[in-house]
Structure formats: structure tokens, C-alpha cells
Image: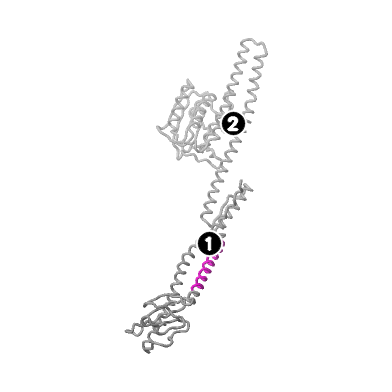
Amino acid sequence: MSARRRPVSLRLRVTAAAALGTALVVLLLGGVAWVGIERQVNAQLDGKLDSVTQVTAANLTSLRVLQGPLPLPPEYAGTLRAGELTLSTTDAELPKFAEGWDTATVDGTRYRVRTVEVLSGLGATISVGAPTAPVQAAITSLHRWTIGIGLGAVVVAAALGWLFAGVAIAPLRRLAEQTRRLGLDPTAPPPRVSGAIEAEELAAALRTLLDANAAERARTASALATARDFAAASAHELRTPLTAMRTNLEVATTLDLPAATRAEVLSDALRTERRVEATLHALERLAAGELSSEADFVPVDLSELLDRAAHDAVRTHRGVDIRLDAPPTLVITGLPAGLRLAVDNAVSNAVRHGRAGVIEIAAREWQDAVVVTVTDDGAGIPADEREAVFERFRRGAGAAPDGSGLGLALIRQQAELHGGAAWFEDSPLGGVRLVLRLPRTPTPGPDGTEPAASSV
């Protein structure tokens, strides 16, 4: 398997792009200059040749001399003809041409030739040729200068591209260094750079990714803590009932007991098993609540939820007068199952531990929140216990002995998950009033909950 090629750096890419762009521009402009130089120099040659030819023709016409040396500069060639007859010529005799411009090579020397009529009426013409070698040498020299300047421009552009690219990618280098430092030290500050929009956007994207990663790590840590708490609480709370149940079963299986005594022992074991089952169910509900996410919150018609809870409670707790006072519609954003769990636990707590005969469930709007109350005429809770009973496995002095001590903890947990609070107040019916304050839209605090309020 071949080794992976090392990627080209951004700085080198920018340098190559600058050099390539300059080369294309130089090629285009150099091509124009190349052709322009040839045309310009040849035009200068033609202009000079035409002047020499016209002057020579004028001298011959004024002198009317048809023989003898031609009055031309030494580097020029010329031939004077009358029809097919050569009247005068320089050492290099030019071929016969019609009037106009031509090119000829004589004795290895290339000439630019201009032919004009002289001595009008005699049919005489003179052809004057200027050697092209000096002109071609000048053109070649200018072409070399053009190539040199073009190559120099490409080199300078590459050098400037390398220099400016270093300045341009400096924010990216700082970002890479900060990210590398963050990988070595998770407590390092998140990357922040300035100087380039792209680098700032990339840094912002990295911060978003790091925040999401941190949130996920916190969620994982919370889940692990919840699992540890669940295991520890289960071991602590279930050890005593399980020991009692095992003792009862050992007595029932090893001793020869009267039927009535055996039935009592087995009945006690069954009650203990039900308590263990209820405790495990409550612990499971607590763990599920702590693992709720933002995606679980949906619009809930609280009035409809309370109506169903009240009807179910009437069937469950026969003989208890359960009343409902709520508007036709009261919509909030929340956890439907969690809210129903809180209401059911509040009613069950009033019936089982408060021995209530009348329970009033009410809901109303208050500022930007909704307040749900469960008021009963039961035994109530002493004022000095009203806060403590919300703790896990804490039971009030008047609580039934078969409770798990988790019902009120579940209620407060749901209130805090919604960014609200739960507390007890005095009841006008003589028992106690449980108050739930729930924002219409959850607004959790830094730790995921909102401090509990003491009153409305």
C-alpha cells in the first residue's frame, strides 16, 4: 500500500495561484507586446526606407542622371532600371520589382525593398533596399527583454504571494495552534481568532462543536451519575425489605407453622414485595426524568391532561371527592408523561398519606407561567417538614408505612425539569396544598433547573 501523500499547504497553494495568474497575464500581455514590437520596428524601417527612396528618386529626377553611382547610404542597396535595362546599381543588385514594397535576399543578405518610378515618361524605376539584419537584431533584443521582464514579474508575484499568503493565513495558524493546545489541555480556553472572516467563522464553528461535545459529555456524566445514584439508592432502600422478605420466606419454608400463621407470614412477604416493586418503579421514573432532553418537550394542553387525571383518580380512589377547576384550554410546552406523573403522585400522596376525603385540582395562568394546585382536607404536613419531604426517601411523620418516599421527589423533579418549582402551602380545606409553578416554555437555569419559589 503506497504511503499517503502529504497535502500541499495553503500558503504554497496561494503562492502557486499568484504565480500562475501572473504568468497568464504576462503571457497575454507579452504576446501583444511581441507582435507590437515587430510591427513597430518594421514600421520604423519602412518609414526610413521610404524616405531614403523618395530622396534618391527626387535627386535622380532633378539631375536627370541615368548612369553612375547611386546617391545611397553605404549600407543600402539600389538598382536603377529602364524597362529590362539596368542603368545603375550598387554592388548588391536587386531583382526587378514593380512599384511598391517587397523583400529580397541578395548574396545572403536579406533586404526590405522599396520601388518607385523616376524620370516620368521614360518608364524608369529605382529599387532601394535596406538590410533587415539590424532590425531583426533589435527585435530579438526587445523580445528577450520582454521574456525577461515577464519571468521576473512571475517570480516577483510568487514571492509577494508567499509573503502576503503568510500574513493572510496567520489567523488560521493561530486557530490551529489554539485547537492543538486545546487537544493537549481540555481546560484551555476555546479557540478565538480575528483578522479574517473565514478564520472567525471556522473558530465559531469549532466553538459550537466543542460546546455540543461538552454538553454531550455532561449528559453522559449525568447519566452515569444517575445510574450510580439509582444503584446506591436501590441497594440502600431495598436491603431492609428484602432481608425481611427473605426471613419470612425462610420461616414459612423451614418451620411447621399453623395455617393462619403461615398465611400471615406469606401475606407480610407479599406486602414487602409490593413495596420493593413500588420503590423500583419510582426509582425508574426518577432516572427517566433526569435523562429527558429538549426534544422530549412538546405542546401540552394542561386542562385536558388534568381532566383525564381527575377522571382516572375518581375510578382509582373510590369514596374520595375529587374536583377539577381549570379553563377549557391551557397549553404549555412540557413533558406529557412527566406532568401526568406529577399530578397522579400528588393525588395518590393526598389519599394514601394524608387520608384526604376531598381533593381539589385547579389550574390557572399567572404572569408568564401556569400554576397547578392540588388541595386536600387530609392530615396535612407539619410546616417544618414541608421542604424535607421533597427529598428522596424522606417520609413525613404521618406518612403511611408502605410508601417509598419517592413520590414527592418525583413531583419536584418534574417541576424543575420544566424550569419551575414545587412547594406546599396551607390548605383552606384543612389539609395541605401542593403548588406547581410551570413556565409556559421551559427556561432552565445553568444547572438545568430553576430555583424553587416560595409563593405565587
Left/right of residue 262 with respect to residue 332 in the rendered view: right
Tell me, yes or no, if residue 427 can be seen here.
no
Tell me which residue sits at (50%, 41%) in the image.
443
Could you say where residue 178 lies in the image, as x and y percent from the top left? 60, 52
Residue situated in front as seen by the camera: 125 or 20: 125
Q: Quadrant of residue 65?
A: bottom left
Task: Please name the amino acid that badge 1 sits on.
Answer: Ala
Going from N to C along the chain, the mark reached first, 2 or 1, is 1
Between the C-alphas of marks 2 and 1, the distance is 73 Å
Give the total of numbered labels: 2
What segment is highlighted magenta in the picture? 139-164
Residue where numbered disc 2 is placed: 392
**The magenta stretch spans residue 161:** yes
- Residue at the limit of the structure toward the front, as seen here: 85
The residue that disc 1 covers is 19
> Callout 1: helix, strand or loop?
helix
- In the rendered image, the vertical position of residue 291 relative to residue 271, given as above or below: below
> What is the x, y in percent for residue 438?
48, 36
Mark 2 vs mark 1: in front: 1
Q: Residue 204's x, y, as percent?
A: 53, 50
Residue ID at (64%, 17%): 249
